Amino acid sequence: MSSELKSLIEYLAKALVDMPEKVEVNEIVGEQTTVIELKVDKSDLGKVIGKQGKTARSLRTILNAASTKLRKRSVLEIIE
Protein backbone atom coordinates (compact mmCIF):
# COMPACT_ATOMS: atom_id res chain seq x y z
CA MET A 1 0.00 0.00 0.00
CA SER A 2 1.40 3.36 -1.02
CA SER A 3 0.93 6.10 1.55
CA GLU A 4 -0.19 9.64 0.83
CA LEU A 5 3.19 11.01 1.93
CA LYS A 6 5.12 8.71 -0.39
CA SER A 7 2.80 9.60 -3.30
CA LEU A 8 3.16 13.30 -2.54
CA ILE A 9 6.98 13.25 -2.63
CA GLU A 10 6.96 11.08 -5.75
CA TYR A 11 4.60 13.50 -7.51
CA LEU A 12 6.64 16.57 -6.54
CA ALA A 13 9.98 14.98 -7.43
CA LYS A 14 8.73 13.83 -10.85
CA ALA A 15 7.56 17.37 -11.59
CA LEU A 16 11.03 18.77 -10.75
CA VAL A 17 13.34 16.43 -12.65
CA ASP A 18 14.23 15.83 -16.32
CA MET A 19 14.05 12.05 -15.95
CA PRO A 20 10.87 11.28 -13.98
CA GLU A 21 11.12 7.57 -14.82
CA LYS A 22 14.27 7.37 -12.66
CA VAL A 23 12.53 8.73 -9.54
CA GLU A 24 12.36 6.15 -6.74
CA VAL A 25 10.63 6.75 -3.43
CA ASN A 26 10.88 4.34 -0.51
CA GLU A 27 9.02 4.57 2.73
CA ILE A 28 10.40 3.13 5.95
CA VAL A 29 7.81 3.18 8.68
CA GLY A 30 9.23 3.29 12.18
CA GLU A 31 7.44 3.36 15.52
CA GLN A 32 7.53 7.15 15.82
CA THR A 33 8.88 8.45 12.54
CA THR A 34 8.44 7.57 8.89
CA VAL A 35 11.49 8.00 6.68
CA ILE A 36 10.81 8.84 3.05
CA GLU A 37 13.83 8.07 0.87
CA LEU A 38 14.04 9.90 -2.44
CA LYS A 39 16.40 8.66 -5.14
CA VAL A 40 16.75 10.43 -8.49
CA ASP A 41 19.10 10.19 -11.45
CA LYS A 42 22.54 11.69 -10.76
CA SER A 43 21.97 14.43 -13.34
CA ASP A 44 18.75 15.45 -11.55
CA LEU A 45 20.22 15.58 -8.04
CA GLY A 46 20.85 19.32 -8.27
CA LYS A 47 17.23 19.92 -9.25
CA VAL A 48 15.77 18.27 -6.14
CA ILE A 49 18.33 19.88 -3.85
CA GLY A 50 18.27 23.33 -5.44
CA LYS A 51 20.50 26.33 -4.80
CA GLN A 52 21.78 26.20 -1.22
CA GLY A 53 19.34 23.36 -0.57
CA LYS A 54 16.27 25.55 -1.03
CA THR A 55 14.28 23.02 -3.07
CA ALA A 56 15.10 20.21 -0.63
CA ARG A 57 14.06 22.46 2.25
CA SER A 58 10.79 23.25 0.49
CA LEU A 59 10.10 19.55 -0.11
CA ARG A 60 10.74 18.90 3.59
CA THR A 61 8.41 21.76 4.58
CA ILE A 62 5.60 20.39 2.40
CA LEU A 63 6.18 16.88 3.78
CA ASN A 64 6.16 18.25 7.32
CA ALA A 65 2.86 20.07 6.73
CA ALA A 66 1.26 16.96 5.23
CA SER A 67 2.62 14.78 8.06
CA THR A 68 1.26 17.13 10.70
CA LYS A 69 -2.16 17.00 9.08
CA LEU A 70 -2.03 13.19 9.19
CA ARG A 71 -0.69 13.34 12.78
CA LYS A 72 2.52 11.56 11.82
CA ARG A 73 6.21 12.43 11.95
CA SER A 74 8.27 12.06 8.83
CA VAL A 75 11.73 12.82 7.52
CA LEU A 76 12.87 13.20 3.91
CA GLU A 77 16.21 11.64 3.00
CA ILE A 78 17.63 12.42 -0.43
CA ILE A 79 19.84 9.52 -1.47
CA GLU A 80 22.78 10.20 -3.78
Image: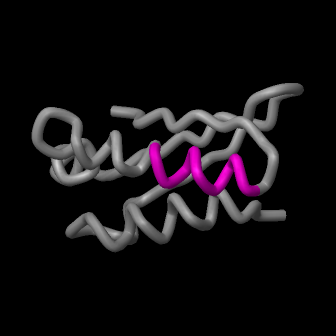
Q: Which residues are magenta?
A: 61-69
Q: Is residue 21 left or right of residue 11?
A: left
Task: Quadrant for residue 79, please give it.
Answer: top left
The answer to whether residue 22 is above or below residue 64 is below
Q: Position of residue 17 (x, y in %)?
A: 25, 64
Q: In the image shown, does 57 or 19 lie closer to the viewer?
A: 57
**Residue at point 28% right, 50% down?**
48
Dominant SS of magenta comes to helix
**Where residue 49 sits in the image (x, y, percent)?**
25, 42
Work out whether 53 lies above or below 61. Answer: above
In-image side of 48 versus 8 (left or right): left
- The image quadrant that residue 54 belongs to is top left
Work out whether 70 lies above or below 37. Answer: below
Residue at horizontal 32 percent and vertical 43 percent from the top: 56
Residue occupying image coordinates x 46% and y 46%: 61
* Residue at the extreme right: 31
Residue 30 percent across, percent down from the top left? 82, 28
